[in-house]
Image: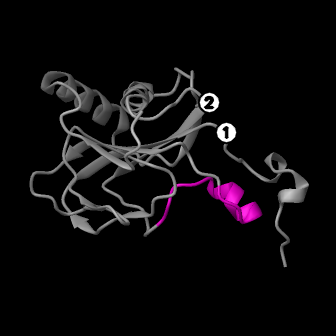
Amino acid sequence: MSTAQVLIIDNYLEEQEFLCLKKRTLEVMGSEVLQPTYYPLNNSTHKYVEISNLLISAARKFYDLKSCIGYEIWNHNNTRPSGRHSDKDDVYYSLTGKLKYPICTIVYYLNVDMFLEGGLLKLEQYGSIVPKENRVVIFGPGIFHEVEKYTGERVSFVMNPWNQPVCDGPDDVPSEELKEII
């Protein structure tokens, strides 16, 4: 397994396989912006299972996912995160003030306009990564990142594999871990 914190895999799929995946996924997705959604690892019923399996396979080559029990997946369909952040269990953090990180973060660029201006993925302490179709970017837990403003078309899928349950609300947190609300 790799100890590198940032991995970039260009041309992850063969060209024809990529073009077919891109066409199928964009047709299924339409203009939808998928919010982070958690699925158990062996769930094969959601509409993005094909791309989910692809991303898990990419990460398995570099990260030990034996303890992975599920994943969150979402897309950025000509959108971007609101600012600098690290991927974490946001609900758990808001309830406890404590951090729980995924095993890693995986970004897959499905559609990038050849006239795209901006839109770099900026990884703190690691530099900037240009979005490129069929590119997979995998980085370790706790790395702060952001996407710069851009013009043009840019569709990416993002996945966080988890080795612990993701918190849905206060019932998922032991009472002694809940922070005091003043």
Residue at the (42%, 33%) spot, across then down = 1
Dividing the picture into quadrants, the one containing residue 68 is top right
Tell me if 79 is positioned left or right of 17 in this view: right
**x then y, percent, for residue 5:** 39, 50
27 or 83: which is nearer to us? 83
**x then y, percent, for residue 135:** 24, 41
Badge 2 amino acid: Ile
C-beta proximity under 8 Å, tags 2 and 1: yes
Mark 2, Cα crowd under 10 Å, few <14 / some 14-19 / many 20+, is some
Residue located beneath label 2 in the image: 69
Q: Is residue 115 above or below residue 19?
A: below
Q: Secondary structure at mark 2?
A: loop
**x then y, percent, for residue 173:** 81, 50
The disc placed on residue 26 is none
- Measured in 3D between alpha carbons, the distance from the residue under mark 2 to the one under mark 1, in whole angstroms, is 7 Å
Residue extending farthest to the bottom is 182
Part of the protein shown in magenta: 85-99
Q: Is residue 26 above or below residue 95?
A: above
Residue extending farthest to the right is 175
Dividing the picture into quadrants, the one containing residue 120 is bottom left
Residue at the (15%, 58%) spot, across then down = 116
Residue located beneath label 1 in the image: 164
**x then y, percent, for residue 73:** 48, 41
Badge 1 amino acid: Gln
Residue at the (25%, 52%) spot, across then down = 154
Locate the C terminus by quadrant.
Answer: bottom right
Tell me if 166 is positioned left or right of 58 in this view: right
